[in-house]
Each structure stands twice: as C-alpha cells, then as structure tokens.
Image (tube, grey):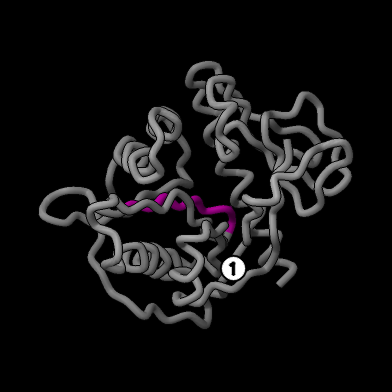
C-alpha cells in the first residue's frame, strides 16, 4: 500500500508539472527538492491547476496558490472540503470487468470536455491542449458521433496515472467512465505496466472502487 501511495502522489505531481511545462500564459513548472507542480498565474482560483505536491517537511519557496501534501505544511490553511483520496490498483492480478473499443481524442478535446464537465471556462483546455509529453495518452468514447467521455493517462515508469476523467453532462449515468478507464487500464497492462493510480473526486470514487481501486493515501490541500 505504501508503494501504491507513493506512485499515486507522484502521478498527480508529474501531471501538474506537465501543465506547467506548456508555458501557456506564463505557466511554469515547479521542481525544487520535495516539491513538484505548476505555477499558472492566470488560474490562481483553481486548486488543481496552480498547484504543487510537497513531500513532508519540504521547503516551500514561492509556492503556487495550492499545495497538496499528506500533512499540511506549517503556516498554511487546510481546505478540508477538498481532500483527495489517492487510489491504487495492482494490474498483475486485475481483470477488466468491462470491454469497450475506445479512440484517442486530441488533447484539445480532452481539455475542452473537462472544462465543460466541471462548469468552468478556459482553465484546463488551454493547458491540456498544449501538453507535449510522450508519456501522455488519451482515451475516449463517442455517442452519436459526439465525444461523450474522455480520459488522459500518464505513464511514470511501470505505473499508469489516470487523470482528467470527464463525461459530458448529457451522457452521464450510462457507465461510460468505467468503460473508458477500464479500456485505458487494459491497454497499459498489455504494455507491461504493473500498477494504476489516481486521485478520486466524490463523483468518481464509486466508479473506481467498482473497477478494483482501493484508497492508499489522502492528499490534503492548503493555501
């Protein structure tokens, strides 16, 4: 469980770093001892964009708006309402409960659908659409020729980090997220990836549990 927790937290941190490296609107990567993330000056209202992940005891030098950690750093205010469960899954013993033929949408589509799904504008779309990292893959399903559900994955060593799962409001309650995530996991497992990790929202937690994920740690947000 400890190793899965480390992998889950690392996957989130590296995903944030990908956003920073885009440079969009002055975005920049944060990578100091024990701290990895992104500084995005035009998105300081978003705890998942202008954000970094910090190890316990790491020195915070000009941190972004939000810092995620398993223990809230001294002098910062915890946002208790948005603590995130980190979840993990051993793919060696996993069998997909679902089967679906998914496609690979563009990064722009993944960003746009995420912004729509979460009721925001121009927060993730400009950044996700500009990611340039060979470890990143996209997965999605269409309904009636419209993109209905998308997922982004980032491979870090032999772990696949599942990020930016979003379903258009018109197509929810159909089990599409489970289909797309399940297909992404199956693809990664077939490529020799050993574990899958993610951070769950309240809406997604039950979906991930049914796929076999279990909570391995909790990341706490602070400003």
Above-or-below relation of 48 to 3: above
Q: In this view, does 21 lie to the left or right of 220?
A: left
Q: Which residue lies furthest to the top in this view?
A: 26
Tell me where residue 204 appears, x and y as whole percent. Answer: 46, 62
Outermost residue toward the front in this view:
81
At 38% from the left and 39% from the top, the residue drawn is 119
Q: Is residue 140 above or below residue 23?
A: below
- Quadrant in which the N terminus is drawn: bottom right
The answer to if 26 sits in the magenta stretch is no
Q: Which residue is drawn at 30% across and 54% down?
A: 149
Residue drawn at the location 54% of the way across and 26% of the way down: 43
Looking at the rendering, the stretch of residues picked out in magenta corresponds to: 150-157
Q: Mark 1 points at which residue?
A: 88
Determine whether the residue tagged by mark 1 lies in a helix, strand or loop: strand
**Left or right, 148 with reference to 123:** left
Quarter the C terminus occupies: top right
Residue 112, position in %: x, y?
Answer: 33, 37
Q: Residue at x 63, y 26 (%)?
A: 39
Predominant SS of the magenta segment: strand
> Which of the two residues, 160 or 212, is positioned nearer the viewer here?
212
Closest to the observer: 17 or 82? 82
- Mark 1 Cα shell of 10 Å, populated few (<14), some (14-19), many (≥20): many
Residue 129 falls in which quadrant of the image? top left
Residue 60: where, in percent of width, then height?
82, 32
């Amino acid at each position: 469980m400890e190793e899965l927790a480390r992998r889950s937290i690392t996957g989130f941190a590296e995903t944030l770093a990908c956003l920073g490296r885009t440079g969009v609107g002055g975005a920049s990567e944060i990578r100091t001892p024990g701290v990895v993330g992104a500084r995005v000056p035009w998105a300081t209202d978003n705890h998942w964009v202008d954000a970094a992940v910090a190890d316990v005891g790491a020195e915070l030098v000009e941190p972004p708006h939000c810092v995620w950690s398993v223990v809230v750093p001294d002098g910062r205010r915890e946002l208790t309402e948005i603590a995130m469960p980190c979840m993990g899954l051993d793919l060696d013993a996993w069998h997909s409960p679902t089967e679906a033929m998914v496609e690979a949408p563009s990064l722009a589509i993944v960003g746009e659908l995420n912004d729509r799904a979460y009721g925001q504008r121009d927060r993730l779309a400009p950044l996700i659409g500009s990611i340039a990292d060979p470890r990143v893959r996209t997965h999605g399903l269409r309904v009636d020729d419209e993109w209905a559900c998308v997922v982004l994955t980032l491979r870090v060593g032999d772990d696949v980090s599942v990020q930016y799962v979003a379903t258009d409001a018109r197509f929810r309650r159909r089990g599409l997220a489970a289909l797309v995530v399940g297909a992404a996991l199956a693809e990664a497992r077939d490529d020799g990836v050993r574990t899958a990790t993610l951070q769950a929202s309240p809406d997604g937690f039950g979906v991930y549990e049914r796929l076999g994920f279990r909570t391995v740690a909790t990341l706490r947000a602070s400003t």
